[in-house]
Image (cartoon, grey):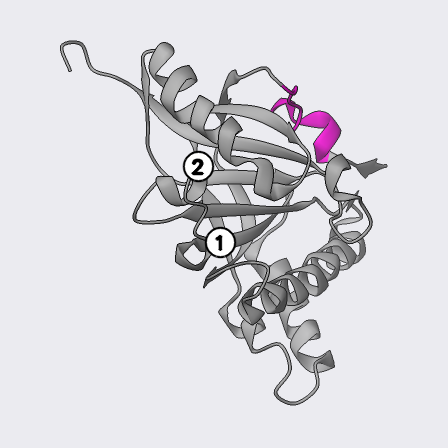
Amino acid sequence: MKVDLKSELGDYTAARGRFDVVTVPPRGYLMLDGRGDPNTASAFGEAVQALYPVAYGVKAAARRQLDRDHVVMPLEGLWWSDDWADFTSARDKSRWSWTLMILQPDWITSELVDTAMATARAKRAEGEHDALDRLRFEQLDEGLCVQTLHLGPFDDEGPVLARMHDEVIPGEGLRMRGRHHEVYLSDRRRTAPERLRTILRQPVEAVPPGS
């Protein structure tokens, strides 16, 4: 039976206009780091092109070796900058750093990932997808988070994030920590901008009494 983690994991469901406090346990991801405007930086496209062949290679290796099948998860991204205003008001994408990721089921091992990466390297043309050499399989432990669903273009996220950062999180007696996280439930290549569905997630922690 093919497993679809989007349906099984509760934090891959969110509602527009509602801000949920969720606990995200440690999970393994294929990851690739970069910096710059995702619309113009060549590194962003190269990272996507490196991640997906490995993700599908892991799926194939798991079917062969473990007789277990799964739906390849959507692209996700961790985003950060020296100034939170770069995400909410200034939207200065040239200052953004990012880690693109694809979640892996908990039965995926580093050996399966190594097999998939070796296969991807063997298929690439000379000098192609140098990003593949920087890809890693790593666990991310986010813990307590606040998240919501954004419907529409990525450039319209600013007011939603401002509300999350400035109103919702402090109102819950929490403060931000870690990196802004986005889960791209829609394929941007096949979806009109106004119909894009993106989970916006922010790791948080309780504000100590008296702070």
Q: Residue at x 62, y 76 (%)?
A: 129
Is residue 3 found left or right of 165 in the rendered image? right
Q: Nearer the viewer, residue 82 or 135?
A: 82
**Image location of residue 138, percent across then percent down:** 48, 52
Q: Residue furthest front?
A: 90
For residue 9: magenta?
yes
Q: Residues within 10 Å of mark 2 (few under 14, many from 20)?
A: many
Q: Residue at x 48, y 35 (%)?
A: 26
Q: Nearer the viewer, residue 34 or 142?
A: 34
Q: Secondary structure at mark 2?
A: helix
- Look at the image and give the residue range highlighted in magenta: 5-16
Q: Which residue is mark 2?
A: 88
For residue 159: magenta?
no
**Image location of residue 39, percent across then percent down:** 59, 60
Report whether residue 144 is seen: no
Quadrant containing the N terminus in the rendered view: top right
Q: Which residue is mark 1?
A: 99
**Image location of residue 137, percent across then percent down:** 52, 56
Question: For the residue marked with disc 1, what is the amino acid?
Answer: Thr
Q: Nearer the viewer, residue 124 or 70?
A: 124
Q: Residue at x 33, y 16 (%)?
A: 170
Q: CA distance from mark 1 to mark 2?
A: 19 Å
